[in-house]
Amino acid sequence: MVRPIKDRIRGNYMEYFIQQLINGLTLGSIYGLVAIGYTMVYGIIGMINFAHGDIFMLGGFAALIIFLILTSFFAGIPVALLLLVMLLVGMLMTGLWNWTIERVAYRPLRGSFRLAPLITAIGMSIALSNFIQVTQGPRNKPIPPLVTDVYHIGAITISLKQILIVVITSILLFAFWYIVNKTPLGRAQRATEQDRKMAALLGVDVDRTISITFIMGAALAAVAGAMYLMYYGVASFNDGFIPGVKAFTAAVLGGIGSLPGAVLGGLLIGLIESLWSAYFSIAYKDVATFAILAIVLIFKPTGILGRPEVEKV
Amino acid sequence: MAYTTENNQSGVMTKAIKEGIFAGVIALGMFLLFVGIETYQDINNQLVWRTRWGLLGVFVAVAAIGRFVTVGFIKPHLDSRKLAKAKTGVLEISDEKGFFRTHFLKIALIFLLCYPFLAMLIFGRQGSLKYVDNFGIQILIYVMLAWGLNIVVGLAGLLDLGYVAFYAVGAYSYALLSAHFGFSFWLLLPMAGILAALWGIILGFPVLRLRGDYLAIVTLAFGEIIRLVLINWTDVTRGTFGISGIEKATFFGIWSFDVGAANNFNKAWGLPSSSVYYKMFLFYIILALCMLTAYVTIRLRRMPIGRAWEALREDEIACRSLGINTVTTKLTAFATGAMFGGFAGSFFAARQGFVSPESFVFLESAVILAIVVLGGMGSLTGIAIAAVVMVGGTELLREMEFLKHVFGPDFTPELYRMLLFGLAMVIVMLFKPRGFVGTREPTAFLKERKAVSGSFTKEGHG
């Protein structure tokens, strides 16, 4: 028996929609990981870390270079091991970079006027992307696909790399949640975020806490960078800006300073982007993201999960 | 006494060595992957890698030795100087300024007026083209943009990261209106300004409630939206191809600079045919526009609206309590700043003869904001100096042909332009967080105008 044509279309429609949901969730997890770095730094020192997008790009390049080295030395290396090494070394390297940047460019300006760290952050962002352009060349760097397995459920296709991205993100988020909520380090971070001076008076090493926050943010961004590389199979020196702004949008959408908010915002931005591309136009997908950023800020500046900021006179 | 200094000295040396090694290790970790290994595509278009240990070694050595010298020699030297100064009790304030400093503005203005002729005298007709166009006009465009942005950021304290949008509006209004309606530059210059001001109000209106960083991000979003629309609205803007063949500016309609025209400027004056006269003319236009911007800024600061801007920057709540209408105050700041951006944009379109969305990326906004902040927010002289240093400096890199002899023929200094620009932004901020001109001249004063340190104001002038 042939189904009525209306139902068939609806069925395809539903599957198409679910397919887009899956794509959006994958992209959203990557944005969410980057957004955490923005939101933590903003929460703890009240500064938009403009260079964070380029830290993400740097993480992608670290993963790319590790991938090339490992595959040329050990041709038949298991993919799981390869991925693990890529992620770990990338996290380490990028953490080191962000630690140094914080130490050199942001810490001396702490307590200076509001715009000074923003300008150094923009300067660092320009310097980082051009550093990679100079040392690694301006061309796009394609790598062969890492994981190619694809599963079909009905008409819906899920690739293994999508599952991997979501799983790795979930594991990291859990680890991260544990650190922030259950360890002395996390307590110090939360205390510094609430009141830096008071935390220092009560014996929290504020400088060290801020440094560790930068390292943690960079490590998450590095993982996101590696997964972005795995997902799209290509890295470029100017990959930092647009994903960086989108991740920042995610942080703002979720409520800046709130960690669950950053993840929620990332997922929402990923979903909006993929659904917009699917149903409206791919050309204007970035316009949609930026428009949402503007609308959220204008009508609900605290975001979805953010606390309202009380201005004291 | 001798013993303690010696002890101190050796202590400093040990510390310097330790810090130097530490910096070396950190640098090794940072640059190992990105400098030590080069990825490139081979003939089969496959990504492969090779090592560059020599270069990596240079990076690590520079970091280690640099840190060692800083900790071991420069820092103790600076400390002892500071100590000596504190002991004598003489503060470094001198009321007497040299001839050069008191007459700086006049000298600078006279120099700028003579500049194209000087360049022509020294480098000949074709040789001066580079100096008038690449250095003169290019720097003055940035001076004008930075002065325009200064009204929004330096005076009204509204952080705008999407200023380039108004520049784009100005450029595209000139390009499109002259192509479709055949209007002349002198009609479209004010129109572009008005259109940009209108966009300033349109974009300013929804963000009235926002302050600080949030405002910065929304303006960034608006700037990007305008650029993306320019890219994607291909029917009108021709997308990434841009609009070419934009009409040149005329000498107030009397003479034209088109080579084929009957009333060609060069022919009318009996000059040999060369584009340098057009460039000189453009130089004077942008100089006049800059002067207009500076004049308007200086006059507005003395008017109620300018004082309202500065009051708004210092404290919005106090401002509102005193009955200042913050809505109109903010909107006028946005509109005025945008108008000058629009002027600069239409000038840019006339000068290039070509506009494309490529020219209006976020980087441009960042560069303009950087010039404003590096110059010392609100200080017109400081901003002009910053524009000369930052834009002129990076332009100068194009000229450094002799570096090829040092680093080999493959060395292209242009590649390092933006890298050095970014690093310069960081370094200037670290050493002079208040910008090149760190003192502020108060608008309101009792009896005598005294310069105050920038640290006493939130940002910009006092």
Image: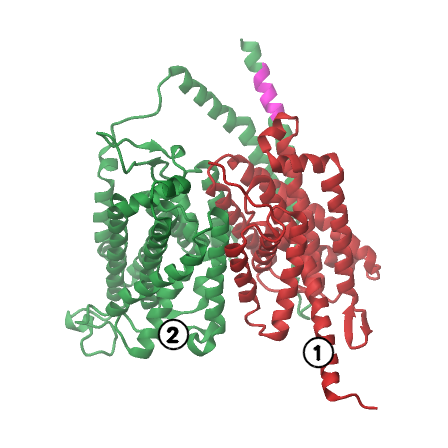
Q: Nearer the viewer, residue B132 or A40?
A: A40
Q: Nearer the viewer, residue B90 or B313?
A: B313
Residue A279 is drawn in which quadrant? bottom right
Q: Is residue B11 left or right of residue B274?
A: right
What crowding class fits label 2: few (fewer than 14 Cα within 10 Å), some (14-19), or many (20 or more)?
Answer: some
Residue for badge 1: A13
Q: Is residue A95 left or right of residue A163?
A: left
| Residue A164 visible from this viewpoint | yes
| Dots 2, 1 in contact, CB < 8 A | no
The amino acid at mark 1 is Tyr
Give percent across and percent down for residue A305.
63, 50
- For the record, the magenta segment spans B7-15
Observer-side mark, 2 or 1, equals: 1
Report the residue that reaches farthest toward the top. Answer: B1
The amino acid at mark 2 is Ser
Q: Is residue B14 magenta?
A: yes
Residue at figure coordinates x 40%, y 45% from the top left? B157
* Letter of the chain that mark 2 sits on in the rendering: B
Q: CA distance from mark 2 to mark 1?
A: 44 Å
Say which colour chain A has: red
Say which colour chain B has: green
Q: Is residue A59 magenta?
A: no
Q: Is residue A256 above or below residue A199?
A: below
Main SS of residues in magenta? helix
What crowding class fits label 1: few (fewer than 14 Cα within 10 Å), some (14-19), or many (20 or more)?
Answer: few
Give percent across and percent down for residue B51.
68, 53
Report the residue that reaches farthest toward the left. Answer: B269
Give percent across and percent down for residue B260.
24, 79
Question: What is the quadrant of the N terminus of chain A in the image?
Answer: bottom right
Identify the mark at residue B244; answer none if there is no mark. 2
